[in-house]
Image: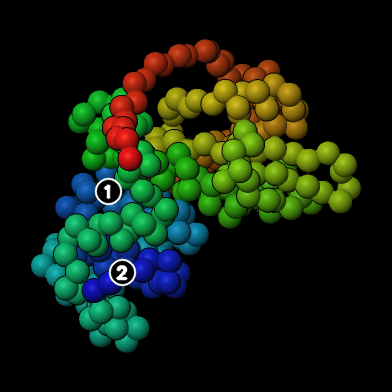
């Protein structure tokens, strides 16, 4: 099978995520670095721009087909469109299936190789989950709630994550001349540590009250958020930390 993830529709991606978690069960959780199914539903669901319950429902849809401890939706036949996805991907091996699920969230293992080399060896299995929590899942969570937050009422959001401008979202309002900048961070648990890059710190220093730090907490259970306006002048205490890394490359003359 030739896999072209970019051509797979959103609903089919959600179905495939459910199929993967049902078929490989705890092995799937370990491969992706999740501590529980609840965490997997939350992170994958938000990262794919959907509800965590959608991932759970699709997993339960396929559970009757596999020998796991769950019964799933065993009192009715599997829906035709889910059966179709199952038949198309049932022969996909574990490694390829894992890579497919990772690709849906824009995860590229090679792009994190330098970062992973600086971390503890026993943390290598958790990189997918960690990167999604701190990145796409938290950002999609923000997009899902931004319009109902009183702090940002009347503002439209523009995603700036790919532009390297020191924040993730630029918010503009017809009533306000200046824009607001929102940097989004995600935490696996209710509490934890977060960091600002030199660029983010520079922009936060410059924009002051127009810079917001939006922290999504507790992806492992039920995510909730906290908003810090002008975070460098508030309750958060940031300290400067420096790390020196060595990057190795291989050169050849041609």
Q: Quadrant of residue 124?
A: top left
Q: Is residue 180 left or right of residue 1?
A: right
Quarter of the rendering occupied by the N terminus: bottom left
Q: CA distance from mark 2 to mark 1?
A: 19 Å
Quarter of the rendering occupied by the C terminus: top left
Q: Quadrant of residue 102?
A: bottom left
Residue that carries the numbered disc 2 in the rendered image: 3
Residue 47 in percent (x, y) is at 45, 54
Residue drawn at point x = 21 percent, y = 54 percent = 28
Residue drawn at point x = 54 percent, y = 26 percent = 197
**Residue 209 visible, this orientation:** yes
The local crowd at label 1, few if under 14, some if 14 to 19, many if 20 or more residues have their Cα within 10 Å, is some
Element carrying mark 1:
helix
The local crowd at label 2, few if under 14, some if 14 to 19, many if 20 or more residues have their Cα within 10 Å, is few
Task: Looking at the picture, tell me which residue is in the foreground, 190 or 123.
Answer: 123
Is residue 94 depicted above or below 215 in this figure?
below
Q: Residue furthest left?
A: 67
Q: Which numbered disc, 2 or 1, marks the residue that appears first in the sequence? A: 2
Is residue 102 depicted above or below 254 in this figure?
below
Residue that carries the numbered disc 1 in the rendered image: 32
Residue 76 in percent (x, y) is at 26, 84
Task: Looking at the picture, tell me which residue is in the foreground, 100 or 31.
Answer: 100
Task: Looking at the picture, tell me which residue is in the foreground, 1 or 167.
Answer: 1
**Residue 60 visible, this orientation:** no
Q: Residue furthest front?
A: 254
Residue drawn at point x = 65 percent, y = 20 percent = 232
């Amino acid at each position: 099978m030739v896999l072209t993830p970019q051509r797979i529709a959103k609903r089919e991606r959600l179905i495939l995520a459910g199929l993967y978690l049902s078929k490989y069960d705890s092995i799937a959780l370990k491969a992706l670095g999740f501590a529980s199914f609840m965490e997997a539903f939350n992170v994958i669901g938000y990262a794919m721009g959907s509800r965590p319950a959608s991932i759970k429902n699709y997993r339960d849809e396929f559970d009757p087909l596999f020998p796991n401890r769950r019964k799933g939706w065993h009192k009715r036949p599997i829906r035709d469109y889910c059966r179709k996805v199952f038949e198309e991907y049932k022969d996909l091996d574990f490694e390829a299936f894992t890579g497919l699920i990772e690709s849906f969230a824009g995860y590229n293992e090679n792009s994190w190789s330098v970062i992973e080399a600086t971390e503890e060896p026993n943390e290598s299995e958790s990189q997918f989950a960690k990167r999604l929590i701190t990145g796409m899942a938290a950002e999609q969570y923000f997009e899902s709630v931004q319009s109902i937050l009183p702090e940002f009422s009347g503002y439209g959001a523009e995603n700036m994550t790919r532009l390297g401008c020191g924040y993730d979202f630029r918010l503009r309002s017809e009533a306000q001349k200046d824009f607001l900048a929102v940097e989004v961070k995600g935490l696996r648990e209710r509490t934890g540590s977060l960091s600002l890059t030199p660029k983010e710190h520079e922009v936060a220093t410059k924009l002051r009250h127009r810079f917001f730090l939006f922290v999504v907490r507790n992806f492992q259970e039920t995510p909730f958020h906290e908003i810090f306006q002008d975070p460098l002048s508030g309750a958060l205490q940031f300290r400067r930390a420096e790390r020196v890394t060595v990057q190795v490359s291989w050169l050849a003359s041609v």
